[in-house]
Image (cartoon, rainbow, N blue to C red):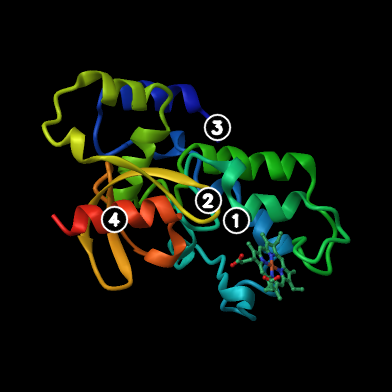
Amino acid sequence: MRRPFLFLCSALLGISGYAAAEEVLDYKAEVLSIMKKNCWDCHSNENEVKGNVDLDPATLADQIGPYNIIRPGNPDESGFVERLKLDESHNDFMPRKGSRLSRREIAAIEEWIAAGAIIDAEQLSPEEKTRLAEARPGAKEMESGSGATSDAGDYRTWTNTAGRTIEARLISLGPATVKLQLRSGKTYDVPLQDLSPDSAAQAKALGDR
Ligand code: HEC
């Protein structure tokens, strides 16, 4: 059931716990049946897990994140969606050996990702709670407009070799990876070689301080 407006209200009021679970667009309700119909033979641990993509709700979190194939809040940059929209003759087109999902099915997946790519509204992880808050329109402006966070200056823009950018701060620099933290508090280990030359240089400069 889709009631995004109600969800917005509870988010704005800061109601925690998201008691009204049906107000959140989640994978289980909006997307899972589409996956079962079109992708399950090749992407579930009931059968086979091709390309390391297991679409089972229990393991889907592995595919979700700012550098992953499902990028919360960002359907346009999600490789997951990109593949569904390719020409059927393209090598990367999904479902392989199947026909294109309908426009409505693709739109449902895009909406789900735009709304924060939540797996199960009844069992929100701490990260998902943050994502829900971030998916709310205006959340970013409110955050930067508050100016109250003392460590705001630590957040910088990072770009990967594919040209995607995130805002994060450097937590640590290792020999081959950087640990970056998003405003949500979530941290990621990013291989230095996946960063653009500028961002890799930025990591090294900061790490040397
Ligand atoms: C007949 C088997 C088959 C079906 C059905 C299928 N896939 Fe795949 N999929 C593969 C194989 C094989 C790979 C790994 C090779 C590749 O990346 O092209 C793959 C890879 C992927 C990847 C790439 C992972 C990455 O790291 O980039 C995504 C995303 C994906 N599939 C999504 C889907 C979705 C969504 C569906 C259903 C709409 C689907 N697939 C249906 C066989 C299938």
Mark 1, residue position:
32
Q: Secondary structure at mark 2?
A: helix
Instruction: Please state the horizontal and vertical placement of residue 93, each as a whole percent of the image.
Output: 77, 60
Dot 4 and dot 2 residues touching (CB under 8 Å):
no
Q: CA separation, marks 3 and 1?
A: 15 Å
Disc 3 from disc 2: Cα separation: 12 Å
> Which amino acid is tagged 4?
Ala
Q: Would you place residue 195 above or below residue 111 in this image? A: below
Q: Label 4, on which residue?
A: 203
Which residue position is annotated with label 3? 2
- Give yes or no for contact between labels 2 and 1 (Cβ–Cβ under 8 Å): yes
Q: Cβ–Cβ below 8 Å for labels 3 and 1?
A: no
Q: Is residue 18 above or below residue 54?
A: above
SS class, disc 3: loop
Gap in Å between the C-alphas at discs 4 and 1?
39 Å
Residue under circle 2? 27
Which of disc 1 and disc 3 is earlier in sequence?
Answer: 3
State yes or no: discs 4 and 3 in contact (Cβ < 8 Å).
no
Quadrant location of residue 41? bottom right
Mark toward the start of the polypeptide (2 vs 1)? 2
